[in-house]
Image: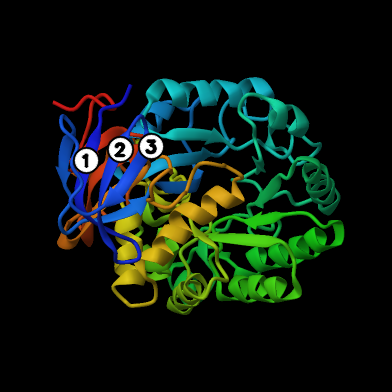
């Protein structure tokens, strides 16, 4: 049984100031001047109460690659970043392409207790792109998988992609595509353009992403199914999604915090922390994805949290792994790039980082507003401070953050997951709910 909490003076995403009374994992009452004898009081003056953040795209590496991350360590990183729910990608070993593996991941998440861990199932067996995985079995398993992706690999065969889109219609599923034409990106090391030519690195053309998205939105329209585009990164991709939505195609898209902030110029120092898939793009692309997120063309922010051991990053650029960790920094990046610039409100943040991911992932009871009668999953965020992001901010197993040494706004003060406190007064709890 969770502790009774009385949150005093929080500001909701719409600017309303209120108290929150939390009991048995539910927000039972809101309003000013609430009182409850025996409740633990949390002073939320100056803090914004956002719905628990939901990340539709993380890599927790377990089973198989526990040197990079485990479901426990990844869950701790998520809670530290204000998240209460994450969707884990299937590129594990064994690949999450069967009911047994996704149920194992679900159980490990439940045992960790920091966040709800919702597995994503692979589209194809072994993520090899040759034949469909056990989509139906994963959907009817205890994990109730509704999102399927070969992330890290593009479902490049249009026949396989069409069959997958048709199959998931039966249970309201969605195919989340890693849009990367493999033939156009063989040996690619960074965004194709002036900088890649200067550095002598093989270029990764924008069209490799855009061509797959264009094909897949047409396939989704043809079969009347749902398509989600992972980590969109180019101006052309934004234009295609905008066109598809105007046409009435059931497509959604995500952008990562790093594609909202960082450009290809960061590659000039050959620091492999900035090597990522898809690659960092141009300043014009960054502006386009910011605009796409602001106007609703892009539906959500997702971190693509991709931990790696230090030896796979502390090496020459060409040999380094793709990916960066991002859970602990995500809200602060969105705050700095989108809210401080006036492009988005806190209500927009709640929509793109909580409500919309829950809707796309078909998770009922998640991403709900901070309101009476709803599950008590929320984060209390202090927008006032600005401080240097450091190794002390990282709570996962890996250290490959591109933001180390950067000045970032804001701070997560409290994270509450269904009434269980996971972050208290800025400190991650060693045991969820174990307040002193």
Picture coordinates of residue 98, whole percent (x, y): 69, 25
Residue 263, numbered circle: none
Q: Are marks 3 and 2 in contact (CB under 8 Å)?
A: yes
Q: Which residue is mark 2?
A: 22
**Relative to the observer, which residue lies in front, 225 or 284?**
225
What residue do we see at 23% from left, 36% from top? 5
Q: Which residue is mark 1?
A: 6
Q: Which residue is mark 3?
A: 26
Instruction: Note whether 230 is above or below 418 in the view shown.
Output: below
Label 2 CA crowd tier, 10 Å (few <14, some 14–19, many 20+): many
Relative to 404, 331 lies left or right: right
Q: Are marks 1 and 2 in contact (CB under 8 Å)?
A: yes
Task: Answer yes or no: is residue 94 visible.
Answer: no
Relative to 436, 406 lies left or right: right
**Relative to the observer, which residue lies in front, 380 or 158?**
380
What residue do we see at 59% from left, 61% from top? 253
**Relative to the observer, which residue lies in front, 89 or 430?**
430
């Amino acid at each position: 049984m969770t502790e009774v909490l009385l949150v005093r003076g929080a500001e909701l995403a719409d600017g309303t100031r209120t108290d929150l009374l939390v009991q048995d994992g539910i927000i039972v009452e809101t309003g000013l001047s609430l009182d409850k004898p025996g409740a633990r009081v949390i002073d939320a003056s100056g803090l914004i109460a956002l719905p628990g953040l939901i990340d539709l795209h993380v890599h927790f590496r377990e089973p198989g690659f526990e040197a990079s991350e485990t479901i426990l360590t990844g869950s701790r990183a998520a809670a530290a970043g204000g998240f209460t729910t994450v969707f884990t990608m299937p590129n594990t070993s064994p690949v999450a392409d069967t009911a047994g593996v996704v149920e194992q991941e679900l159980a490990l998440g439940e045992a960790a207790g920091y966040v709800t861990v919702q597995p994503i199932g692979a589209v194809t067996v072994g993520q090899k792109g040759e034949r469909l995985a056990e989509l139906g079995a994963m959907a009817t398993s205890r994990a109730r998988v509704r999102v399927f992706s070969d992330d890290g690999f593009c479902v490049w065969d249009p026949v396989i992609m069409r069959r997958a889109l048709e199959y998931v219609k039966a249970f309201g599923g969605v195919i989340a595509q890693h849009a990367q034409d493999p033939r156009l990106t063989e040996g690619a090391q960074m965004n194709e353009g002036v900088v890649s030519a200067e550095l002598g690195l093989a270029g990764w053309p924008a069209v490799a992403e855009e061509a797959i998205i264009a094909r897949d939105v047409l396939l989704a329209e043809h079969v009347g199914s749902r398509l989600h585009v992972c980590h969109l990164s180019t101006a052309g991709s934004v234009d295609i999604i905008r066109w598809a939505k105007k046409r009435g195609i059931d497509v959604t898209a995500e952008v990562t915090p790093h594609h909202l902030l960082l450009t290809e110029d960061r590659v000039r120092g050959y620091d492999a922390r900035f090597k990522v898939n898809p690659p960092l793009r141009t300043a014009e692309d960054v502006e386009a994805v910011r605009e796409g997120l602001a106007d609703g063309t892009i539906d959500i922010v997702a971190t693509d949290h991709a931990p790696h051991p230090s030896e796979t990053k502390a090496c020459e650029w060409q040999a380094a792994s793709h990916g960066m960790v991002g859970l602990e920094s995500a809200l602060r990046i969105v705050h700095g790039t989108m809210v401080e610039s006036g492009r988005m409100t806190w209500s927009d943040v709640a929509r793109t980082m909580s409500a919309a991911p829950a809707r796309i992932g078909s998770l009922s009871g998640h991403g709900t507003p901070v309101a009476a009668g709803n599950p008590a999953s929320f984060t209390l965020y202090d927008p006032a401070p600005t401080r240097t992001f450091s190794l002390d901010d990282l709570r996962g197993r890996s250290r490959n953050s591109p933001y180390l040494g950067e000045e970032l706004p804001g701070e997560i003060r409290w994270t509450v997951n269904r009434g269980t406190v996971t972050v208290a007064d800025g400190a991650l709890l060693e045991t969820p709910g174990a307040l002193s």
